Amino acid sequence: MSIADNLLKYKNELSAIDVQLVAVSKTQPVGLIEEAYAAGQRIFGENLVQEMADKYEQLPKDIEWHLIGHLQTNKVKYIAPFVKLIHAVDSLRLLTEINKQALKHNRVIDCLLQIYIADEETKFGLGFDEAIDLLRSETFASLANVRIAGVMGIATNTKNPKQIKAEFYELRTFFKGLKESFFRDADYFREISMGMSDDYKIAIEEGSTMVRIGSSIFGKRNIKPRQEGVNQENK
Ligand SMILES: *Cc1c(COP(=O)(O)O)cnc(C)c1O
């Protein structure tokens, strides 16, 4: 199936239930993104800052770029002028830097709090208590140029659908709690970014509003993406 066929399949499936598709184009050449763009896709997800900035330069300016990978504080400045949504905010320090860079460009940048739901040591993300502490902090209250639009999570990489389902359920439940406690009147707090090629169906069942799908649109990635920031920076 072509990229256009794959996108059409997702569009038919997702638009009826009002779930957004982030086409994850990391490691994919600009030509394939152009193919997806020609088929009508406008939201693309990347996990490396430099790669996203390069592609932004080369591609049409009505693309909405979502950063889905871990973001290092010292790299925020490269994407602050144009990034549409940052999915993986995992510290107050990072959020403070995003606010600072957004202010320089006279923007308000939408962010999701990445919540740790997987049963794996290597994943980034805030624990439930950490997320609540962040939202309660005076520092957070002072940040006028970032907006928390919801939460994001990555389930354990397992073949066990029950476990994945339980993890997504936890994220949705936590989202609802945050909505009640901190964002009751905030219409913009509405996104639950969960689900990838292999687990998006479960994610949708559990209330995802935004799925991040790469390989089943573009095909297998032949370069293993470098994990940005691993062991390079203390939170
Ligand atoms: C790569 C990636 C995806 C997409 O994964 P696929 O299995 O190719 O669909 C989704 N979310 C994040 C955070 C990723 O890094």
Image: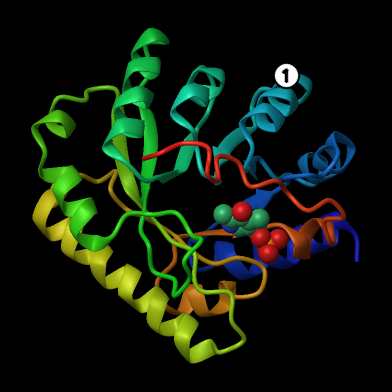
> Foreground residue, 231 or 96?
231
Which residue corresponds to the image point at 47% horizontal and 91% vertical from the top-left?
162
Q: Quadrant of the N terminus?
A: bottom right
Looking at the rendered structure, the kind of residue marked 1 is Glu
Q: Is residue 214 above or below residue 66?
A: below
Side of 62 relative to 103 (left or right)? right
Side of 192 relative to 141 (left or right)? right
Q: Is residue 55 above or below residue 184?
A: above
> Foreground residue, 166 or 44?
166
Q: Is residue 30 above or below residue 225?
A: above
**Image coords of residue 20 (percent x, y):** 53, 55
Q: Quadrant of ligand 1?
A: bottom right
Can residue 60 be seen by looking at this rendering?
no
**Image coords of residue 127 (percent x, y):** 28, 60
The residue that mark 1 highlights is 57
Q: Quadrant of residue 38?
A: top right
Q: Is residue 212 above or below residue 144?
A: below
Which residue corresponds to the image point at 22% horizontal and 53% vertical from the top-left?
130
Q: Quadrant of residue 222?
A: bottom right
Q: Residues within 10 Å of mark 1 (few under 14, many from 20)?
A: few
Side of 189 relative to 88 (left or right)? left
**Image coords of residue 72 (percent x, y):** 49, 33
Which residue corresponds to the image point at 59% horizontal and 34% vertical from the top-left?
64
